[in-house]
Every structure is written in C-alpha cells, then in structure tokens.
Amino acid sequence: MIISVYRRCARCVMDTVGDDQITFNDQGICNYCQHYYEFLAPQIPNPILAKVLLSGKIEEIKKEGAGKRYDCILGLSGGVDSSYLAYLAYRLGLRPLCIHFDNGWNSELAVQNIQHIVNKIGFDLETFVIDWREFRDLQRSYIHAGVIDIEALTDHAIFASIYQCAFRLGIKHILSGSNLVTEGIVPRHWTHNKADYINILDIQKKYGSLSLSSYPFIDKKTKNKIKNKGIQTVELLNWVQYNKMEAKETLKREFDWQDYGGKHHESVFTKFYQSYILPTKFKVDKRKAHLSTLICSGQITREEAIRELEKPLYQTETLKQDKDYVLKKLGFTEEEFAQIMQEKPVPHNTFNTEGSFFEYYPFLKPLRPLWKKIRIMSGR
C-alpha cells in the first residue's frame, strides 16, 4: 500500500522522501527491492552460463569486425563502469574505438583518467565536442522548465554521437557500461526516456533562445537506421563477476585511475545536479538508489549504506565553489537560480513526448492543451 508518513525499506535504503510512488509489502520490503529480486536478479546469469554467453558474444563481435580497423565502439567517460569496461575489452582481445563526449563540464580528473587508460592500452580515442552555445541554452531551458532529468540532454547526445560513429564506420556492436548489479534500481519518475527527442525539442521551443543546428538527435530516422543495420548494444559487465570496489582497485593498480568520490562525479555539472539540484528542488538523493542496488546485489550491507547516507552530499566550501562555477557558466544569478529551485517541479509529460497519442494522430493535436490541463488537474 502507498503510505504518507516517513518510512524506509527494511531491506535496502529507499524511503518515502521525495518518492510518493514507493510501496511496501507486509514485511516492510519496498517495491524496488521486490522488482530487483523478482525481475532483475533472474536476468543475471550464473557464472557458468555467463562465461558461455560472454565467449559467444566476443566471438560474434570479432567475427563481424574482421577486416575492419575496429570491431566495436566503447563510450568512455572516465568513470568506474566505462573505465573497467575498457580494461575488460582489452583483456578479451577486442578492438574498440573509444568515444568520449565533451559537453563542456569535464573535470580535469576525468580527462586524466581517460588519457591514462587509452595511452596504456593503446586504444584509439575520438572526442566529440558539443557546440557549447547550444548545449548551454538547452541546459538553461531544462532548468527553467522545472523537469527532473536535466541529464537526459547529455545522455541523448552521447548515444546519438556513438550511433553516428557506428554508421560512419560500419560497426554493429556498441559496448555499454550499464549493468544490473550497480545500477539496477532507478525509480522511473526520477528520470525520463533518454531517447525522447520530441521532449527535448518541445522544451527548447518553449524556453530556449537558440535554434538547434548541431545538437545530435536520435530521431525516428536514426532509430530506423539503427534497427535496419542491426546495431546492438552489448552490456558485457552483466556477464562477468562485476564488483564495484574490486573494479576500482583494479583500475587504480593498472592505470593510476583516481576515484571521484561519487557516481558520475567525473562531470562537474552532474556532481552539482545530483548533489544539489536533485535534493534541493526534487527532494531526491540518488545515492539511495545506487546504494540500494549494491545492497540487493550483495556488494555492501544495509548498515554500510546507512552510514554512507549520513555523510553530507557536499562539503560547505566545495558546494560554494561548484555552485559559483555552474551558475556563472550557465548565466544564472544566485537570486534567479534560488527562485527556480523553489518552484514546483514539472513532469516531463507536461511537454510533448515521443510516442504520445497526439504524435501518432496529428489531426488531434489541437486538443493537446486541454488534455495537458486535465492531466495537471488530476495530478497525473
């Protein structure tokens, strides 16, 4: 049942703060834990089957890439998941082209980690640099719009850039660092469909000041091309015994890799977004989801997770430094930004979304404003 008073899951650390969709069973176990054990955990193959699946997929990638300079593409951010994926690809004898997406927010540590990895392994690296004026305007639009998934802008452009590269080089396999044992729990209402280009366009149309001429989109034409060319995303980390702490130690030993102190903190904006914008405006602490996944996959205990959550999201001086930097770079005054943080969050589906009823039946679009008003009034 849905409850209105504070409660924390008896198994993980998900709770009712900023989450009106969490539910608990009679044992006090939340719906996220139940979903993980019932639907996600069974998708993780046992070691014997995982070895067979991994061997078969590696053989397939090598065979398809025979005679080509690269047999796959690997997105490399410098974070632990993508960095360990690069190490794994090297150990498995793959020949990926590493792609790094620079959206203007890279930390110096991220750049350093990436260079250490590609230089030692010998992988080629291509860096896609986004048009900063456009991307800055997009981020400002999303912040003004009040939607939760500002990071969808970066994720969408990363995927689009990788697919464009796959088309250009004739590569059919994309290696992804996504995995179930460290990021399986993500409440759907904390994010939005990363491939929804319609949502991006509509938010920019309403709040942006620039037209988008270079931002890479995954539109319907691109999605059809992906399907027709048989391009696959391969999540290799689901087929190995992936332990986050052990992976970090391996990276430190092999590449002098340095930890950022938080998931996706290789980006200055992502750190500020997860550690300030989300908890301030949306009452969301993403550490709960990250730690709860690690609990469910047996990598940490609930007690360890609770102790981690007791630590502040930001040290006072670091917060001031990052906040000043982000606001100045995005062109917000402190007063203007503070006002935006106090405004009520707005659901992504308040704006046009890909695959909506009205996108499939254009002749009904004149009725969209009325439909949105009804949804808002009903709280949907």
Image (spheres, rainbow, N blue to C red):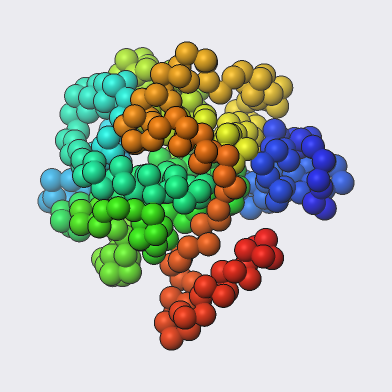
Q: Is residue 181 visible?
A: no
Which residue lies most toward the right here?
26
Q: Quadrant of residue 260?
A: top left
In the depicted structure, whether residue 175 falls above or below residue 88: below
Identified at 48% across, 25% down, the residue is 262
Which residue lies most toward the bottom here?
363
For the residue pair 270 and 201, the one nearer the viewer reads as 201
Number of numbered labels in the structure image = 0
Q: Quadrant of the C terminus?
A: bottom right
Identified at 81% across, 45% down, the residue is 4
The x, y position of residue 248, in whole percent, is: 43, 22
In the depicted structure, whether residue 241 falls above or below residue 139: above
In the depicted structure, whether residue 335 falls above or below residue 180: above
For the residue pair 72 and 21, the one nearer the viewer reads as 21
Q: Quadrant of residue 85?
A: top left
For the residue pair 86 and 164, the one nearer the viewer reads as 164
Compared across the picture, whether 110 is left or right of 143 comes to left
The x, y position of residue 263, in whole percent, is: 47, 30
Q: Is residue 217 visible?
A: yes
The x, y position of residue 42, in whole percent, is: 61, 49
Identified at 37% across, 44% down, the residue is 139
The x, y position of residue 170, in whole percent, is: 18, 57
Identified at 13% across, 50% down, the residue is 68
